[in-house]
Amino acid sequence: MTGIGKIAAASIISNLPILGYINSKQASSLIGVASINRESGLFKGHQKIQGGRPQVRTVLYMAIIACIRKIIVILNSMLRDGVSWEASKVIN
């Protein structure tokens, strides 16, 4: 399984058994990462995420943080070595 860890996958599958039967907008709303507009009259431009299933949102947040940390390490080593970006070398 590439791209996501076993714990994150198990958490998503166990907390969202309906995932294969809904579209992406419904899934983002169910997880609680869909932006919700709060606009009324002159009060415009305020969006926030709320609701959803916090366990799944927390697991996905931790997976994203792990990916960001890995990308930072890769980019720092590339800067150190003076190597330009090549996707074929970095994917593995």
Image (tube, grey):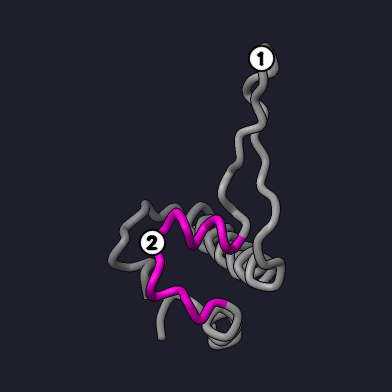
Kind of residue at disc 1? Gly
Q: Earlier in the sequence, mark 1 or mark 2?
A: 2
**Residue bearing the label numbered 2:** 23
- For the record, the magenta segment spans 16-31
Numbered disc 1: secondary structure: loop
In the displayed structure image, the side of residue 65 where residue 89 appears, left or right? left
Query: Which numbered marker is on residue 41?
Result: 1
Q: Nearer the viewer, mark 1 or mark 2?
A: 1
Numbered disc 2: secondary structure: loop
> Does residue 7 sit above or below 41 in this rendering?
below
Q: Position of residue 5 (x, y in %)?
A: 53, 82
Magenta stretch, main secondary structure, is helix
Instruction: Identify the residue shown where x is 63% and y is 23%.
Output: 45
* Residue 92 lies in quadrant: bottom left
In the displayed structure image, the side of residue 44 where residue 71 appears, left or right? left
Instruction: Identify the residue shown where x is 64% and y is 34%.
Output: 47
**How far, Cα to Cα, is label 1 from label 2?**
31 Å
> Does residue 65 sit above or below 17 in this rendering?
above
> Does residue 55 sit above or below 10 in this rendering?
above
Q: Position of residue 87 (x, y in %)?
A: 31, 61
Instruction: Identify the residue shown where x is 66% and y is 14%.
Output: 41
Is residue 5 inside the magenta stretch?
Answer: no
